[in-house]
Image (tube, grey):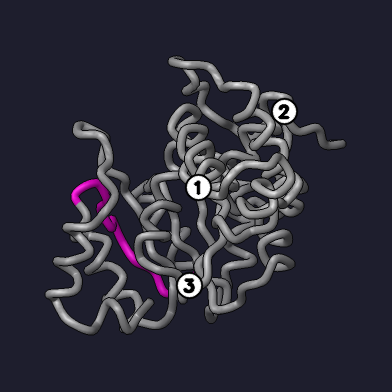
């Protein structure tokens, strides 16, 4: 991620031009970046502040500085590193959830990345978890997702882990207001929840891969999903995929 930020201002301009087309009039999201690597923080702040709908309200080098800053300046989303001096992200996450409950959204942004890390910290109260190697567009998607939906799962997270972490309180806006899901689309949703890929689904229900991809596109458009993980959350929330809580 850092190499992309520091390469040139031209690349930042390119990212701005290619960014997701969010709705005009949407409220600017105030965020905080908490990390003890100043070059990384400066680069990330520059890129995020270049986005018209994101404002970096402040940065902090550790959890202690974060908590002090929050007493004066509240933000909507916090990008939180795990390994920091004085107060690390683990302790800060615990205090934030105890003090602010769900009024602030937290995305862990760390060099440590595995499904076990995702499981551990999202169960501890994080709303999303990303590697520092993530593409900036993925980070932007995560910021908007936690702000609007209350959670973010990267598309490569397994359906099994998404199912494990989703609970009855996981929000999902009721955006299905137009054409209802077809029987075929519901079938595709159920197979996605089982961890099947588009080629596997195509083989199972005897359709082309392109047809399955078209179904997935229409499903995403109807329910407001950004990725497969969103589809799985929707399926669980609305009874298309049953799990034991």
Asked if labels 1 and 2 touch by Cβ distance under 8 angstroms, the answer is: no
* Residue to which mark 1 is pinned: 210
On the rendered image, what quadrant is the N terminus found in? bottom left
Disc 1 crowd, CA 10 A, few/some/many (<14, 14-19, 20+): few
Q: Nearer the viewer, residue 195 or 94?
A: 195
Q: Which residues are magenta?
A: 52-63
Residue corresponding to mark 3 = 62
Q: Would residue 184 appear left or right of 218 to someone viewing this image?
A: right
- Between circles 3 and 2, the one closer to the viewer is 2
Kindly identify the residue that appears in the image at 52 percent across and 33 percent down.
219
Of marks 3 and 2, which one's residue comes earlier in the chain?
Answer: 3
**Between residues 218 and 93, which one lies in front from this camera angle?**
218
Label annotation for residue 60? none
Label 3: element kind: loop
Query: Magenta span has 166?
Result: no
Q: CA distance from mark 3 to mark 2?
A: 42 Å
């Amino acid at each position: 991620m850092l190499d992309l930020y520091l390469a040139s201002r031209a690349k930042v301009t390119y990212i701005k031009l290619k960014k997701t087309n969010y709705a005009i009039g949407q409220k600017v999201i105030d965020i905080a970046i908490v990390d003890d690597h100043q070059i990384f923080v400066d680069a990330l702040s520059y890129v995020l502040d270049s986005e018209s709908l994101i404002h970096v309200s402040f940065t902090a080098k550790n959890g202690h500085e974060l908590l002090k800053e929050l007493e004066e300046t509240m933000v909507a989303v916090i990008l939180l590193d795990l390994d920091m001096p004085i107060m690390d992200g683990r302790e800060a996450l615990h205090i934030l959830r105890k003090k602010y409950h769900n009024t602030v959204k937290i995305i862990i942004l760390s060099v440590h990345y595995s499904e076990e890390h995702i499981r551990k910290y999202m169960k501890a109260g994080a709303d999303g978890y990303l590697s520092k190697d993530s593409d900036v567009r993925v980070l932007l998607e995560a910021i908007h997702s936690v702000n609007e939906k209350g959670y973010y799962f990267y598309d490569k997270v397994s359906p099994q882990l998404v199912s494990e972490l989703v609970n009855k309180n996981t929000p999902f806006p009721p955006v299905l207001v137009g054409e209802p899901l077809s029987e075929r689309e519901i079938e595709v949703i159920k197979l996605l929840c089982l961890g099947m890929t588009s080629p596997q689904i195509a083989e199972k229900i005897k359709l082309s891969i392109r047809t399955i991809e078209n179904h997935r596109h229409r499903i995403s458009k109807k329910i407001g999903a950004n990725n497969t993980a969103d589809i799985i959350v929707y399926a669980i929330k609305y009874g298309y995929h049953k799990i034991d809580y």
